[in-house]
Image (tube, rainbow, N blue to C red):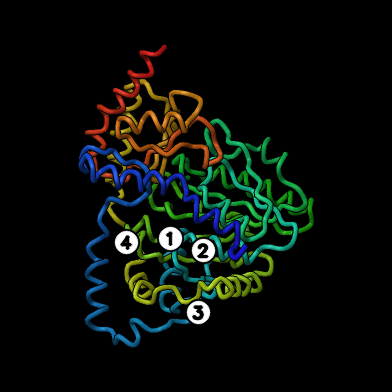
Amino acid sequence: MSYNKEMFELGNHGSAIRELYEYGRKRRQIVGDMNVYDFSIGNPSIESPKIVEETLVNLIKNKKSTVLHGYTSAVGDESTRISIKNQLNKTYNANVDHNKIYLTCGAAASLAITLNALYSTHDELIVFAPFFPEYRVYSLNSGYKFVIVDPSPDFKINYESLERSINKNTKVLIINSPNNPSGAVLKEEDIIKLATYLKKKEKEFNHPIYIISDEPYREIIYDDIKYPFITNYYDDSLVCYSFSKSLSLPGERIGYIVVSSNAKDSDEIFKAVAGAGRALGYVCAPSLFQYLIANVVEETSDISKYKENRDYLYNSLKELGYELIYPDGAFYLFMKALEPNAISFMERAKKHDLLLVPSDSFGVKGYVRIAYCVSLEMIKNSIKAFKELKEEYDNEK
């Protein structure tokens, strides 16, 4: 065989999210944009803050092109890393060191680098269902045994399942809050409980157990919930972040890794992060957007519009009789399918031009994810289709 079979399979079978998105793109060409209710992909619909465009224009006009488009340090521009450190320490009263920040091509690169940096032979990785499907891809490519913890009723942390799953080979746990796909948020009491539990397990197994906190939706939290920054609660932690959602820059692929200054062997871990970035070819994130971030790190898009979308969609679907997980953050709604088979339900929904992602690839059966980072107008227009779909199932009873 002249190619890597595992890589072929990844290329030959795209993610369920991307496949549905491509279906919607083709469908819109046939029936028109306004007649397809595409809730498939987490592509921000809110414009970036005006200062983003103004800063980019200013950089292009006033910064030498040899600097603007030249290489930065492999770990990232120092002034940008200092700006990120200052923002995190100001916002969360954290103890972040800019010398422990590694700039990346978005959260995907952050996760791939971090997992490779921490891996040793026989290590296991724990994820909490429901989880972002690409975690499986990143972890298996790094070498980990991929271990799934079953969801709790509130879609947070199921400690009975966690206790059955954790063992002496457990090296890493990934937490994702606000969660993709459920929108659940781990609050301060949740993080304190998890940190306390893992500290005991570190002593029991006599080695560090790392939390990787995947935080691309960190700023998208509603109802005045305080966000608990993980390094304040658990020493052996790393943060993977992307500006894709907070600044509506998904296509620019810019993010970072933070290694907790209090982690055991934090200097060595950061060097392993830099080494993994080198080995994977993830050195020197896009220079233009590094310089942009240095100037807009405290800005966000108008998050209130997502809350408006959430409230309208949640209340409308609840009124129609759908069962839903109330989302405290992100821009996803997790809805119970009207039959046990979520894939079959998705296919029925497609006949109404409703594009909903089945939960199977998220590690949970019987739900669909609705990405409401779309226009409010589309959400309002879609309610008729949701109503027709519900009536179709009700009439079959």
Indicate whether 354 appears above or below 100: above
State which mark lies toward you, 1 or 4: 1
Question: In whole angstroms, how far apart are the C-alphas of marks 3 and 4?
Answer: 25 Å
Q: Is mark 1 on a helix, strand or loop?
A: strand
Image disc number at residue 48: none
Residue receiving disc 3: 74
Residue receiving disc 4: 299
Q: Earlier in the sequence, mark 3 or mark 1?
A: 3
Disc 3: CA contacts within 10 A as few (<14), some (14-19) or many (>=20): some
Residue receiving disc 1: 242
State which mark lies toward you, 4 or 2: 2
Answer with left or right where residue 80 lies relative to residue 193.
Answer: left
Question: In whole angstroms, how far apart are the C-alphas of marks 2 and 3?
Answer: 14 Å
Is residue 377 shown to the viewer in this render?
A: no
Q: Is mark 4 on a helix, strand or loop?
A: loop
Question: In whole angstroms, how far apart are the C-alphas of marks 3 and 1?
Answer: 18 Å
Quadrant including the C terminus: top left
Q: Which of marks 2 and 3 is nearer the N terminus?
A: 3
**Residue type highlighted by circle 4:** Glu
Query: Dots 1 and 2: beta carbons under 8 Å?
Result: yes
Residue receiving disc 2: 110
**Residue type highlighted by circle 1:** Ser
Indicate whether 228 appears above or below 149: below
Q: Residue at x 31, y 27 (%)?
A: 386
Query: Dots 1 and 4: beta carbons under 8 Å?
Result: no
Q: Is mark 2 on a helix, strand or loop?
A: helix
> Residue 219's x, y, as percent?
39, 53
Indicate whether 184 appears above or below 261: above
> Residue 133's x, y, as percent?
52, 48
